[in-house]
Structures are given as structure tokens and as C-alpha cells.
Amino acid sequence: MEFKHESVLLQEVLDGLCIKSDGIYIDGTLGGGGHSFEIAKRLTGGGRLIGIDQDEEALSAARQRLNPFLDRVVFVHDNYENMETDLRGLPADPEGDRDSALMFPGGPEGCIDGILLDLGVSSYQLDNPDRGFSYRTDSPLDMRMDRGAALSARDIVNDYSAQEITRILRDYGEERCAAKIAANIVRAREEAPLETTGQLVEIIERSIPMKMREKGGNPCKRTFQAIRIACNRELEVLEDSLDTMIGLLKPGGRLCIITFHSLEDRIVKNAFRRNEKPCICPPEFPVCVCGRVSKGKVVTRKPILPGKEELERNRRSASAKLRIFERV
């Protein structure tokens, strides 16, 4: 299956990164390389692009798409949570080996001009029935973005307790019928393990009252989102990585993050705010005594949303929000 994914908020990301021809940029969720193609095209003065993705199929597709720019692009198969560690071992020459001079001999902190994260699941992953991300096709329960990872959606629905599944559906999917769905999952797996997305869909549909199914789109969306997030540790990885990524930026460097649901957006918004105004002194103190210094400024007081033309062209962009932080 061909890797297809239309880049969301493309021009807004390019504007937000303020790309310099000799800069160093990181795409921490490389995907099919749509955003990265346009970034690499602008690196005409010796700049570098580092593309990171945990999905080997995405990396393979990105290598093909970015073939004209192999002199300036380095590909890394990993989760962006390991970004700092990965950068320490990168060769200065994108086409060199690991024994050549390092790109960051003194460490990567304060060396990066821009970082992009385009979170969530790609169109390719959703549309590929082998991956198990979609509730619209009957396929194996998988949902792993890194197919080499140990934990899959099948493990969650068959091995987790009713209490654990309820928490996942409630916290990551904001599902009001979480307890009922979890109880029905446990009841069904007592007869035989759940193996397919179709089995899960059937359980979800009979767990949600008809009145509630008539609102808010497909009733399976929240449960599939929740299990996918848990399977890939998406929120945990995001929350634990933001401060590190800001620390990698040069003064004036920018971190651009596209989110697709309120849980991600809230984490990004709060982290950006905390790094802009880190002081924890009581408000009645006349001066700051905690010693915490601002790392930068929030460029986007309100998130940037897709325009009408993009919404008409790509319906999956509807929930996208772009937030930008600039290092000082």
C-alpha cells in the first residue's frame, strides 16, 4: 500500500519555523515526509534536516520522497522521546557512517533552529487495514506505530483488567460509557480472545445507548483513540519530551506542534506557558526569589487552525491545532 498523507497546516508550519537556509531542523514525526520535503527544499546554505519516526514504513516512504535532498537529511528510526540521545550520535555528514565526525560534538543543547511535531495517526496508518487503527475495516487488533513494540491493542483488550480499561477509555477517550464498554470487553474475552477491530466495534456499539450514538459522530471513535494512545504511550511521551525539546533550541529557535485532540493540545499549551513563565513565587511577593528563568515566549496565544480551503480539501485537518514556542 502506498504511503499517502496530506500534510496539515503546511504553509503555517513553514512560516512558523522561520526557516534559515543554513539552519538545523528536526521533524520528530517524519511520517511520509510532506512537511520535511518543503523544509529540506529550503536548506540551500548547508542546512540539515533530521527526520525521526518510529514507524519503519513511514521512514521508507520518506526516504523515497526526500531522495532529492539526501545530502542534507538524516533519518532516525526511533520515538521522538529519545531525540536528545539520538542527536548525540549523529554524524556530521548525512551520508557518512557512525565513525565519522559528530554533528554535535559538544552536545545538541542549544543547537537546533527548529523542531516540528505533527502528532496523531497518519492517513496511511488509518487506511491500511493491516495496522488496525481504523474502526471502519475489520482487521487485526494492533494499533502499534512502531511495529516492533511489545504492546499492542490486542494485549490491552485481552490482558488489562476492567478497571484499567475503564481508566484508559475515560482518561484518553473521554468516553462516558467507559465502564460499560470495559465490562463487555471482559465478558466477551472470557469466551475467546478478541482478535479483530470488528469484534471490538461490535462490543462498543452494543455498550452505548442508541440516544448517545446519535450525537458526536461514530461511537467507536473515542474508544479507538483511547486504546491507540495507551498502546503507544502518546500523552506520556509528549509530556515528558517538551521541556527537553525546548532545551535543544537555539535562541530564536522555534518548536511547532500540531495536535489533533484536546488532551494533546492541553499538554502543549500548559508546557509552553510553564516555560514562558516558570516563576512559582506566591503572587504577593514583590520580586521573584525562586530563581526560575523564562526559556522563551509563546508565539501563538491562540492556536492556528486550518483555513476554509484546507478544510474543504482535507476533512481530516478539521481538528488540527498548531502552537508555536520561541526560545530566548
Image (cartoon, rainbow, N blue to C red):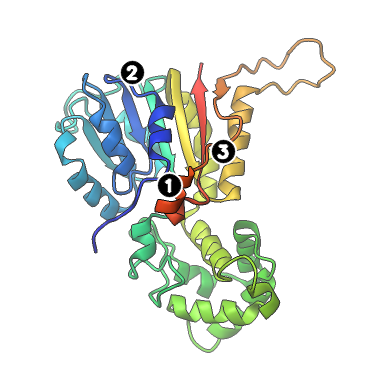
Mark 3 or 2: in front is: 3
Q: Is residue 272 above or below residue 262?
A: above
Mark 2 — residue? 106
Amino acid type shown at disc 3: Val
The x and y percentages for residue 228 are: 49, 61
Furthest-bottom residue in this view: 191
Residue at 41% x, 28% y is 15
In this rendering, would 145 be left or right of 173? left
Mark 3 — residue? 268
- Estimate how packed mark 3 is, as few (under 14), some (14 to 19) or many (20 or more) residues with alpha carbons within 10 Å: many
Mark 3 or 1: in front is: 1
The x and y percentages for residue 108 are: 37, 24
Residue at 14% x, 33% y is 95
Please tell me the numbered disc located at residue 310: 1
Let me know if residue 94 appears in the view.
Answer: yes
- Estimate how packed mark 2 is, as few (under 14), some (14 to 19) or many (20 or more) residues with alpha carbons within 10 Å: few
Number of disc labels? 3
Q: Circles 1 and 2: CB distance less than 8 Å?
A: no
Let me know if residue 209 appears in the view.
Answer: no
Q: Is residue 11 above or below residue 79?
A: above
Secondary structure beneath dot 1 equals: helix
Mark 1 or 2: in front is: 1
Q: Determine which quarter of the picture holds residue 132.
A: bottom left
Residue placed most toward the observer, 195 or 161 = 195
Q: CA distance from mark 3 to mark 1?
A: 23 Å
Q: Determine which quarter of the picture holds residue 79.
A: top left
Q: CA distance from mark 3 to mark 2?
A: 29 Å
- Estimate how packed mark 1 is, as few (under 14), some (14 to 19) or many (20 or more) residues with alpha carbons within 10 Å: some
Amino acid type shown at disc 1: Glu
Quadrant location of the N terminus in the rendered image: bottom left
The x and y percentages for residue 8 are: 41, 45
Residue placed most toward the observer, 67 or 144 = 67
